[in-house]
Amino acid sequence: MAVNGDLASVLDAVKSIVPTLRKNGREAEERRWIPEENITLLEEAGVFRMAVPQRFGGLDLPLADQTKVIAEIARGCPSTGWLTMVWVSSTWAATLYPDKAQEEIFADGDTRVSIVFAPTGTLTPTEGGYLLNGTYRFNSGCRGAHWNFTAAVLEEADGSHREVMAIVPMDKMTIADDWHVSSGAGTGSSTTTAENVFIPAHHIVDYGEVMVCATGDRSNTGATGRNYGLLAFILAEVTAVFLGIAQGAYELFLERLPGRGITYTNWTDQKQHPLTQIQVATARNKIDAAEALSERWLEVLQRRADTGEQPTDEEKAIVRGQTAFATQLAKEAVEILYNASGGSVIQRSVDLQRFQRDIQGFALHALVQQAANLEVQGRILLGMDPDTDFL
């Protein structure tokens, strides 16, 4: 297992590159993909080894430690934080594959894996495995990934169908140049396509089994402290991105405040105005409240993983609701700070406007839609069935 020194080393390295990540933010947006410098710096910091098992030279950090690093990266650059979350959480998901597949995926130690949950591809039987065909939209991280974690409908020899997750070498898929967006532009979340890509059988796991870490033919099962449950794990890391963006926006607001007056008023120092004081306090409290919530679900997920148990449906439903609630708090904090920043904040040279647009866009992701997630949590709290298998 990883030790505290591993986290400290990675976290210190990441904190040192936050100014560079922030400086590169505008370039990332303009080129619709983060600069290679960002990837190199993260790689040198050990970020892409966080979820790699120790037996392959990885750090194997626990979930809570991973979220600290992801939040710190998002504090510097929202798009880089989002991509890190995708690559790291998907790398952890790859540890649920058979040992034979893991040996191939983690052969180089540093591993980046992208993911698409929507099963918009099909797998048909062929000699020794299957052929994958399909098109996958919004494939965050595909341009810098080594592998792609891909949902597909598998057609059995008897004509029946089941949903699976296939791990595919990224160089076997084509990437379209179609990512033209107003939020998260630097993520390069383009459409990817597979055409008759051969997938060996050991690169496929059952969708239902992978959701609850029940996949077979692997040695890292049981009470390893790392079998968290797929969706709850991903939601925890997604929320870390929002918390990091909100913290970054808070810092950017305070940096711009000294010497600013309030136009068309007699206020020559904005920070002296009671409204500004209330806005800053409210934003800070929303961020702190979201962080406090995150500590609750991180504790539950780690406790279950340490005992070799999956979270209960009730716990997973609560994680869904609380992560959505926390991301909403983070988004609201950024909105408050943005709205308190005056008309000059809309200039593209002002980093805060990009943080605002990015968090607004990321909040539209289906995984963090507040109404849908709170409905699932509410049903559980009222003693009802969650009415979804996506837990």
Image: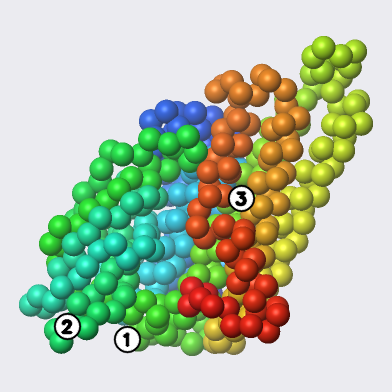
Q: What element carries label 1?
A: loop
Please provide percent x and percent y for residue 101.
Answer: 28, 74
Q: Please, is residue 258 above or below residue 360 in the view?
A: above
User: Disc 3 and disc 1: Cα gap in Å?
Assistant: 36 Å
Structural crowding at the residue carrying mark 1, measured as other residues with C-alpha within 10 Å and reported as few (<14), some (14–19) or many (≥20): few
| Between discs 3 and 1, the one toward the N terminus | 1
Residue 80 seen in the figure:
yes
The residue beneath circle 3 is 242
> Within the image, what quadrant is residue 334 found in?
top right
Structural crowding at the residue carrying mark 3, measured as other residues with C-alpha within 10 Å and reported as few (<14), some (14–19) or many (≥20): many
Which residue does the image show at 15% across and 73% down from the upper left? 124
Q: Do the residues labelled 3 and 2 touch (CB within 8 Å)?
A: no
Amino acid carrying label 1: it is Asp
The residue beneath circle 2 is 159
Structural crowding at the residue carrying mark 2, measured as other residues with C-alpha within 10 Å and reported as few (<14), some (14–19) or many (≥20): few
Q: Do the residues labelled 1 and 2 touch (CB within 8 Å)?
A: no
> Within the image, what quadrant is residue 63 found in?
bottom right
The residue beneath circle 1 is 217
User: Disc 3 and disc 2: Cα gap in Å?
Assistant: 43 Å
Q: What element carries label 2?
A: loop
Disc number at residue 74? none
Which residue does the image show at 22% across and 83% down from the upper left? 160
| Between discs 3 and 2, the one toward the N terminus | 2
Amino acid carrying label 2: it is Gly
Please provide percent x and percent y for residue 360.
Answer: 58, 43
Q: Please, is residue 55 above or below residue 188 in the view?
A: below
